[in-house]
Amino acid sequence: MPAISIIELEKTYSVGFWRKRPKIALRPLTLNVAEGEIFGFLGPNGAGKTTTLKLLMGLIFPTGGSARILDMDISDLRVKTQIGFLPEQPYFYDYLTPSELLEYYAQLSGVPTPDRRRKVSQVLSRTGLQDAAGTQLRKFSKGMLQRVGIAQAILHDPKVLFLDEPMSGLDPIGRREVRDLMEELKQQGKTVFFSTHILSDAESLCDRVAIIHQGELRGVGAVEDLTSSVEGKAEIVWQGSSIPDSLNSLATECHVVGDTVRAVVREANQDAAIDALRREGLRIISVTPVRTSLEEYFVRKVQVSQTATGVIS
Amino acid sequence: MSARVGYIAANTFREAVRDRVLYNLIAFALLMSAAAILVGQISIGIERLVVVNLGLTAISLFGVVIAIFIGISLVSKEIEKRTLYTVLSRPVQRWEFILGKFLGLAGTLVVNTFFMAIGIFGALLYVAHGFHTADGWIVVALYFIILQFLMITAVALLFSSFSTPLLSAVFAFSLFIIGSFAADLRGFAGMAQGFAHWLVTGAAYLLPNLSSLNVITSVAHQQPISAQLILSNTIYALVYAGMAICGSVLIFERRNLK
């Protein structure tokens, strides 16, 4: 049973005051996310990521299709006890402190009264907010609000987490902490569905990713599968500061960085290049096949002929 | 009723208090103190009448302003600031949210009115050096004012569930003013003929009849309020507010929170 099952889910808005015209926000989307998976939902700004998340959260209503979370329809209120949601650029009640806010959310999530204080204290500590627990949220920076957002999403120990741009607004340490937290959630058996347009985050974290552009799914699969297409080239790195003449004709590109040289050669020329370096007595550090990066895959997918028009996020 | 309605109401009350809504009590306290001191000097024999009239009218106006300005932002502010997303992604139904917000603001207005009522009785004690039995009717007038607040809050909430805050404020204020002259409108409906009769009668019954809830003048003149009026006004206000809230819920249940 998939943790999240999306079947032909679509959303079209009517825009315009007098003459209504349709605007497609999400074309029929079919997607499954397995339990315990970290799933990255990638796309440029305005691709339809937030629309998909809002549909799954019941904040907007689909024009067609359906979705199930943990085998329950998304309109079933019981689903919401099992999910946590971090909206993009979260904003909370200014006049509350993190402790009060989390207490309020714990009440709404149905956390039993005897457990509330303990759970609030745990997530405050887990998200590094314990020192700011008594400060009103209006005094918080964007990064601190993002931490509060993550705290409220994990507060009630949900089985499935939906995070919309969770790294947004965080400094490098904060991003690292969120990555660690997501790994930890995966180890606890949680399913994490997160949207991002930062590909390095997705590449380092996700078991699988989907790429969406202009409201349309452009590709889905395991990161290693999507990036495994070998380009028929190899990268050779050796110690030295100069490029032997014999290698100039074999390499398609060469760069000297400090005391190492990096050259990219065609697979057919790989052995000849290694032999040439050995003859020169240079120490070879590595030889690795050049693979498509997630970024290259992503760019290729979003550059596919754009058939959709008037797409909004 | 679900416990979540209570949690949302309590949070709305806390928001209003921390948003310094109750600071209007300071202005009211100053007004009542000034009135009590001045009335004693410039009016002979009608001090009580002036204090009751002024005090109840001020309570009504202060409360209406709060009910409209906070009522119209109850939902729109949550959507605009996206605080609603983290509430509705929990096991909270949309009707629970609307009802909780309504009860939270209604609670704020009741507390506000309670403290203002203390101010009125304090001023009365100062100018009249004691209370009369007829002063008990002031409590009834205060109760009617609270019923007015419930109706206006519900109407403001209804407008805010589909309109912008500015338009909602305009609509709600308009309804308050027209509703305050509802008795005149009904009188006009009785005189009108043909289509105009049906049109004005329909409008008179659709608009809130706030004039029947205004017993300030009677109470100031120490006239009693009939039990029948108390009962009918209670039923009318609760049904009207309930219908406006049902309207809000029906609209909000279908709304896409873009």
Image: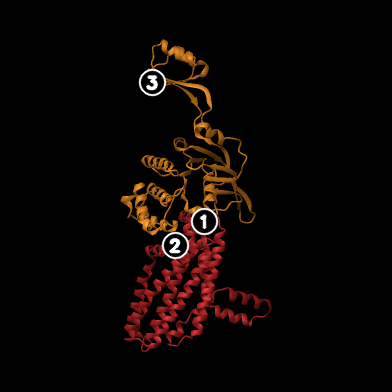
Dots 2 and 3 on the same chain: no
Q: Position of residue B45 (x, y in %)?
A: 37, 89
**Within 10 angstroms of label 3, few (less than 14), some, or many (20 or more) residues?**
some
Give me the chain that's orange. A
Please, which residue is most extreme toward the top here?
A: A279
Which residue is identified by label 2? B8
**Within 10 angstroms of label 1, few (less than 14), some, or many (20 or more) residues?**
some
Q: Gap between marks 1 and 3, in whole Å? A: 59 Å
* Kind of residue at disc 2: Ile
Chain that bears disc 2: B
Q: Gap between marks 2 and 3, in whole Å? A: 63 Å
Q: Position of residue B257 (x, y in %)?
A: 53, 55
* Kind of residue at disc 1: Leu
Which residue is identified by label 1? A77
Which residue sits at x=45%, y=44%?
A190
Q: Position of residue A30 (x, y in %)?
A: 58, 43
Q: Nearer the viewer, residue A133 or B120?
A: A133
Dots 1 and 3 on the same chain: yes
Earlier-in-chain disc, 1 versus 3: 1
Chain that bears disc 1: A
* Kind of residue at disc 3: Thr
Question: In this image, B89 relative to B21: left or right?
Answer: right
Question: In this image, A54 relative to A23: left or right?
Answer: left
Where residue A275 is drawn, which disc sits there? none
Which residue is identified by label 3? A260
Q: Secondary structure at mark 1?
A: helix
Q: Colour of chain B?
A: red
Q: Secondary structure at mark 3?
A: strand
Q: Gap between marks 1 and 2, in whole Å? A: 17 Å
Q: How many marks?
A: 3
Please say if the residues under marks 1 and 2 sit with CB atoms less than 8 Å apart: no
Residue A48 vertical position relative to residue B15 in the rendered view, above or below: above
